Image (cartoon, rainbow, N blue to C red):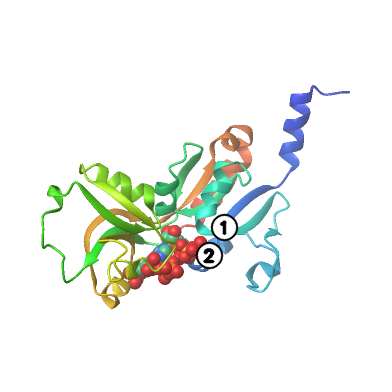
Amino acid sequence: MDLPINERSLRMEAQTPLVLALPKGRILKELGPLLARAGIFPAADFDDEDSRRLRFETNDPGLDVVRVRPFDVATFVAHGGAQIGVAGGDVLMEADSPEVYAPLDLGIGRCRVSVAEPAATAGRDDPSRWSRVTVATKYPNIAQRHFAARGVQAEIVHLNGAMELAPGLGLARLIVDLVQTGSTLAANGLVETEVIAQVTSRLVVNRTALKTRPEAIAALIARFRAALPA
Ligand SMILES: Nc1ncnc2c1ncn2[C@@H]1O[C@H](COP(=O)(O)OP(=O)(O)OP(=O)(O)O)[C@@H](O)[C@H]1O
Ligand SMILES: O=P(O)(O)OC[C@H]1O[C@H](OP(=O)(O)OP(=O)(O)O)[C@H](O)[C@@H]1O
């Protein structure tokens, strides 16, 4: 019997593996044990840093994983290329996408997004009297929103790393960056002056996929939830 086109495409979609986008780097290292407790075992070369493959099957024929840069997890999930992913709260705040739903805090990648400035000048004048300030950051949206809420216009110098160098080299007065132990700031003569947000990594889901494949996605969320430490 011929099925109507909509029903046919829904059935085909239900047979396609879900794609889980995972961030390369430090979060992936912390995520390993959690994936194992959730019963998700990617193909053996997933852990091989020399492998050029980016998409991997798992022990579950209904689930593939892709390994992408941390910021790109939000983009893949927002566009529906990956239906589910793991992203830091910093990345989610920066992307601020209505298509990305974050139902589960995984409690890993714990740090904060903060403002920092040179120890030598910190506290010298009153920030509430500034009308503008130069800020070096890889988080232009977070920084702009943070200062705009205080009536200060942030002029952003967009860097992808080593923000801590910027004040000393005259690129910006302040930085907005991640802080965990504070040792990177201290090693570069900076002090944390304000915490903008606490950060952990979240399980994220594409909102449309949540409607089109609700059972498969709910089952995966439940597996991650059950894998969290009590
Ligand atoms: N010092 C830290 N302590 C704890 N979590 C951190 C720390 N630095 C980053 N994170 C978390 O890990 C995520 C990925 O950071 P990581 O440093 O691995 O990648 P990145 O250097 O930002 O990525 P890229 O390779 O694309 O530049 C961040 O988005 C944040 O949520
Ligand atoms: O407070 P701390 O414990 O010192 O951690 C903070 C540092 O960690 C992150 O950098 P990362 O090590 O990921 O290097 P990156 O700049 O290449 O992203 C962040 O950008 C800080 O530089």
Task: From the viewer's side, name the closer residue of 169 and 111.
Answer: 169
x and y, in percent, of residue 183 in the image: 30, 75
Please tell me whether residue 197 is drawn above or below residue 79 in the rendered image.
Answer: below
Q: Are marks 1 and 2 in contact (CB under 8 Å)?
A: yes
x and y, in percent, of residue 70 in the image: 51, 58
Please tell me whether residue 199 is drawn above or below residue 206 in the rendered image.
Answer: below
Label 1's element? Answer: strand
Q: Residue furthest front?
A: 170
Q: CA distance from mark 1 to mark 2?
A: 7 Å
Provide the residue designation for mark 2.
Answer: 28
Residue placed at 47% from the left, 40% from the top? 97
Residue type for callout 2: Leu
In terms of sequence position, does the residue under pointer 1 or pointer 2 come before the other? 1
Quarter of the view holding residue 48: bottom right
x and y, in percent, of residue 219 in the image: 59, 44
Residue type for callout 1: Leu
Q: Is residue 69 left or right of residue 149?
A: right
Mark 1 is surrounded, within 10 Å at the Cα level, by few (under 14), some (14 to 19) or many (20 or more) other residues, namely many
Mark 2 is surrounded, within 10 Å at the Cα level, by few (under 14), some (14 to 19) or many (20 or more) other residues, namely some
The reply to whether the residue tagged 2 has its Cβ within 8 angstroms of ligand 1 is yes
User: Is any part of residue 230 visible from this angle?
Assistant: no
Residue placed at 46% from the left, 44% from the top? 102
Q: Quadrant of ligand 2?
A: bottom left
Residue placed at 52% from the left, 67% from the top? 25
Q: Residue furthest bottom?
A: 187
Provide the residue designation for mark 1.
Answer: 22
